[in-house]
């Protein structure tokens, strides 16, 4: 058999012909397997959705309970028969709460769809597990050797240093609404920040879902329009887009902070008017991508959304069969942390 | 080096000018001589290293990385120093982080053959930010939004001095500037080596359209032509030994004397003139394009000098002899200038005439038809300058004193054909756009590229343009993407420009001057964009042969 018989790219996303299902479909389909709750991977309107219980809860919180007709939870490690002789199981991806890699087994052939993943420490997400396979379909958001993410705790320390240096200014931290924001809250707690953390309204719902799923984030306070002037010395989390809005200007002399893997590149940070860039990413960096590819033992690698070319080139040099999977629609070609739909859905 | 790297990093992200000055001043306060002096030299662009060049950095990284991966990374990051700083293989060692003075000394004195090894040792010892700062120092383009002027302002802020005072003593100083720091901190004498032909920062204008000028009283203002050349300052005087020194300065304070030995020779007076550099042939102002052929030449040959005779058309007199006129009202300076020009009768320096007007309508008419209003040739001017009669000569861009009233640009609706990644602030965005107009051949309607634009849009529009390019790419050629440009699927850009001329070098046969994106026509289908004939018809309207 060929790997393409089990999984193939289609206009609606990755399609599995024997089981007649899509993974992270871009348009509504009959049966969808969803890796995680980010809007470019989890979309409303599918008939049946299988995902981890956490991802299903996040989708319900963001899209409403009617986001699909029937849902089937798949806890990490459970094996489900999805028809056509295909078995599916979900394994921790370390990206955000509930994020999974999806393993499909068929006729003794194992294919893993990574979704988005990272291997660095994240107290809000289950730790990435290596799943040995024959075909590994990996993301490549940060698939260039210039992306080497530093230790996130060190970046959070930079934020706390700045708060200490400028006690009269509000620190406005642009962070992705689902995942990054909650990880930062937890990292701030781990670094000893015990004061309330102030949240843009768009972040409340997802944060509540995290709490309901058992993640302790300490005290958070929703920012009310009238309170903004009084937030000198506070740490305020907001979606990245809000940094550029009128909303951001009413704080006392705000310091514009952004937490993203893109902050590694100066031009990106400057273009967005960021004064304090924090390199904190929920995606694998160049070293993690390469290590993971080797760890899976896969003989064939498909590379999707991001900087495919560099990673495909590296695989070739390492003697691995690899090809870019030019799927359109995920992460707006590498800008996975800034999808407008994602930000809009949180407002 | 770490402290200096930290300063550069902070400056790169600090948008506010005053905060930048404070950061630099704080650094100068906390850092001892000679470290801070070398930093000042770096910030003012006074350092250049003979052997350390971008090529050497490239060779070092090539030994350590896969060339394809380096190429993709450089294309993405758009900056050599930053790409190398990020890609440099991290090998934590016990190397001591060298101080800035040691690096400057090493870069200056290390033999060319030994330099790569020395440079690699430093790069191993530094972290990402340190490597970036070091490589920026070597490539000579800090690009951290801190000009030489800003650094001098920070020096002035150490004591109770004005930035201009630093500017006046500056030409006589050498890094690491210990005498300068001693003086501003009140520990030493003012450095004496006064330059007899210093640069004086120029006065700049605001666009008249931005002001409610109809409410202004025309009697308070005078107008003159804005000649289409290069704004310069001719500064000349005698040094302590009585030797005559003349210099030609660009608007930004660059000494461009070397390119114009013929003109320098003619500056025999003792004064400072603000004026426009023009090529004149038989008294006629030549196009900007002709002037450009005189610029940027490696060697200035007698042939070049005789074919492109440069002149100064004087706008203002800043200093005459020992007397600084800059505090005086414009009309008083103007009278002094007219007398000065008449007395000198220098064949290389003439007077820019006043354009008379009784009311704003009359001035508007002059702007529309400069030839009829006394400019001689409409192509020679870019528009008008409108100045308050009582305005002193103020450094920078003061409000309400000087205005520029340029021609309205011409526009065409063109179709986006190719996009290329930008550099600096724009790297990783597709920000350079090649656009085309329709022609007809046997195969039917065809787009022919007519120009390239890389500004005119806002940051928000750039994000939208970049997204459009990524979604509608049909071909990739390295950093260039071909974008869909059929009759029905494509993007129309309204392109504004200052002139158009025939060109043998361009496939379209025409070349535009100063094209930029005026508007993005999301609403317009590509087949409704303009035809090449529309652009060709504009060739004689204004500035024939401005571009060739």
Image (spheres, grey):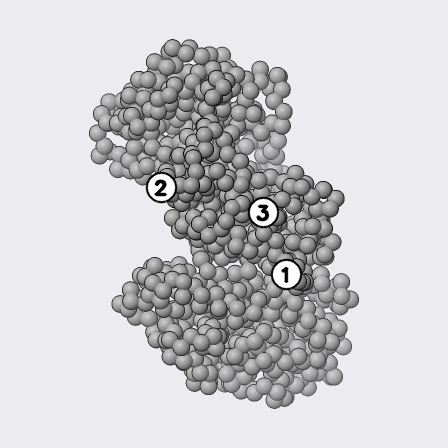
Q: Residues within 10 Å of mark 1 (few under 14, many from 20)?
A: many
Give percent across and percent down for residue A212. Answer: 43, 85
Compared to B235, does B83 lie above or below? below
Give percent across and percent down for residue B508. Answer: 58, 34
**Which of the 4 image quadrants contains residue B123?**
bottom right
Foreground mark, 1 or 2, reads 2
Tell me the distance, in whole angstroms, between the alpha carbons under discs 1 and 3.
Answer: 34 Å
Give percent across and percent down for residue B515. Answer: 49, 38
Residue behind mark 2: B160
**Do residues under tags 1 and 2 come within 8 Å of each other at their CB atoms?**
no
Foreground mark, 1 or 3, reads 3
Compared to A13, does B307 lie above or below? above
**Do residues under tags 1 and 3 come within 8 Å of each other at their CB atoms?**
no
Which mark is on residue A144? 1
Tell me the distance, in whole angstroms, between the alpha carbons under discs 2 and 3.
Answer: 28 Å
Question: In percent of the image, x 63 and y 24: which residue is there?
Answer: B299
Which mark is on residue B101? 3
Question: In percent of the image, x 47 and y 29: which residue is there?
Answer: B193
Q: Residues within 10 Å of mark 3 (few under 14, many from 20)?
A: some
Q: Are marks 2 and 3 on the same chain?
A: yes
Q: Label 1: chain?
A: A
Give percent across and percent down for residue B535. Answer: 50, 33
């Amino acid at each position: 058999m060929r790997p393409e018989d089990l999984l193939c790219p289609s206009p609606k996303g990755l399609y599995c012909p024997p089981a007649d299902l899509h993974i992270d479909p871009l348009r509504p389909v009959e049966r969808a397997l969803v890796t995680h709750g980010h809007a470019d991977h989890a979309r409303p309107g599918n008939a049946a959705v299988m995902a981890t219980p956490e991802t299903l809860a996040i989708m319900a919180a963001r899209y409403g309970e009617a986001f699909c007709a029937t849902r089937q939870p798949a806890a990490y490690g459970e094996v489900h028969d999805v028809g056509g002789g295909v078995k599916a199981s979900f394994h921790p991806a370390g990206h955000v709460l509930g994020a999974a890699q999806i393993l499909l087994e068929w006729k003794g052939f194992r294919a893993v769809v990574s979704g988005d993943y990272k291997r660095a420490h994240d107290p809000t997400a289950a730790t990435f597990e290596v799943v040995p396979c024959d075909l590994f379909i990996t993301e490549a958001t940060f698939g260039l050797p210039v992306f080497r993410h530093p230790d996130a705790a060190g970046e959070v320390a930079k934020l706390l240093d700045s708060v200490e240096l400028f006690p009269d200014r509000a620190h406005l931290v642009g962070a992705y609404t689902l995942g990054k924001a909650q990880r930062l809250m937890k990292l701030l707690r781990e670094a000893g920040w015990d004061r309330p953390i102030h949240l843009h309204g768009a972040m409340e719902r997802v944060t509540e879902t995290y709490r309901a799923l058992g993640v302790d984030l300490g005290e958070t306070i929703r920012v009310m329009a009238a309170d903004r002037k009084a937030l000198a010395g506070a740490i305020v989390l907001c979606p990245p887009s809000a940094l550029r809005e009128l909303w951001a200007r009413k704080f006392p002399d705000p310091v514009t902070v952004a937490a993203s893997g893109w902050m590694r590149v100066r031009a990106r940070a400057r273009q967005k008017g960021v004064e304090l860039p924090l390199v904190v990413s929920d995606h694998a960096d160049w070293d993690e991508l390469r290590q993971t590819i080797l760890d899976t033992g896969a003989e064939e690698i498909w590379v999707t959304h991001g900087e495919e070319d560099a990673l495909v080139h590296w695989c070739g040099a390492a003697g691995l069969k690899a090809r870019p999977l030019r799927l359109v629609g995920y992460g707006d070609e590498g800008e996975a942390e800034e999808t407008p739909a994602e930000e809009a859905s949180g407002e | 080096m770490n402290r200096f790297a930290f300063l550069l990093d902070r400056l790169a992200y600090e948008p506010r000018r005053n905060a930048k000055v404070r950061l630099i001043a704080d650094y100068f306060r906390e850092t001892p001589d000679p470290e801070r002096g070398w930093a000042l030299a770096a910030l003012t662009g006074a350092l250049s290293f003979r052997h350390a060049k971008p090529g050497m950095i490239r060779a070092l990284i090539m030994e350590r990385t896969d060339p394809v991966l380096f190429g993709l990374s450089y294309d993405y990051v758009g900056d050599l120093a930053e790409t190398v700083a990020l890609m440099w293989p991290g090998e934590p060692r016990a190397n001591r982080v060298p101080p800035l003075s040691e690096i400057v000394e090493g870069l200056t004195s290390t033999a060319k053959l030994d330099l790569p090894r020395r440079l690699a040792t430093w790069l191993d010892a530094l972290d990402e930010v340190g490597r970036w700062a070091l490589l920026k120092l070597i490539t000579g383009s800090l690009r951290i939004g801190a000009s030489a002027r800003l650094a001098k302002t920070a020096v002035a802020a150490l004591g109770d001095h004005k930035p201009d005072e630093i500017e006046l003593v500056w030409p006589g100083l050498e890094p690491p500037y210990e005498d300068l720091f001693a003086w501003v901190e009140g520990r030493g004498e003012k450095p004496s080596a006064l330059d007899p032909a210093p640069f004086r920062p120029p006065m700049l204008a605001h666009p008249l359209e931005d002001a409610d000028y109809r409410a202004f009283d025309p009697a308070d203002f005078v107008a003159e032509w804005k000649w289409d050349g290069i704004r310069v300052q001719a500064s000349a005087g005698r040094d302590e030994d009585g030797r005559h020194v003349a210099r030609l300065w660009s608007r930004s304070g660059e000494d461009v004397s070397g390119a114009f030995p013929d003109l320098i020779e003619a500056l025999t007076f003792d004064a400072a003139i603000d004026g426009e550099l023009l090529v004149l042939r038989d008294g006629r102002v030549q196009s900007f394009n002709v002037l450009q052929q005189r610029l940027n030449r490696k060697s200035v040959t007698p042939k070049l000098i005789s074919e492109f005779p440069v002149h100064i058309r004087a706008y203002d007199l800043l200093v005459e002899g020992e007397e600084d006129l800059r505090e005086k009202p414009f009309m008083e300076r103007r009278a002094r200038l007219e007398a000065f020009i008449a007395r000198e009768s220098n064949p290389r320096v003439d007077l820019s005439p006043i354009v008379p007007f009784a009311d704003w309508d009359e001035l508007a008419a002059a702007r529309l038809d400069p030839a009829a209003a006394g400019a001689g040739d409409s192509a020679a001017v870019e528009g008008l300058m409108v100045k308050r009669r009582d305005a002193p000569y103020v450094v920078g861009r003061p409000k309400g004193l000087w205005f520029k009233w340029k021609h309205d640009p011409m526009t065409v609706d063109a179709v986006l054909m190719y996009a290329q990644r930008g550099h600096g602030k724009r790297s990783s965005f597709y920000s350079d756009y090649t656009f085309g107009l329709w022609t007809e051949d046997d195969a039917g309607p065809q787009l022919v590229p007519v120009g390239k634009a890389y500004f005119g849009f806002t940051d928000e529009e750039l994000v939208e343009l970049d997204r459009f390019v990524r979604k509608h790419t049909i071909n990739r050629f390295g950093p260039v993407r071909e974008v869909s440009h059929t009759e029905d699927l494509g993007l129309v850009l309204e392109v504004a420009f200052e002139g158009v001329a025939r060109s043998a070098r361009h496939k379209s046969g025409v070349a535009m001057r100063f094209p930029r994106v005026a508007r993005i026509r999301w609403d317009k289908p590509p087949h409704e964009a303009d035809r090449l004939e529309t652009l060709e018809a504009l060739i004689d309207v204004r500035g024939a042969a401005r571009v060739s």
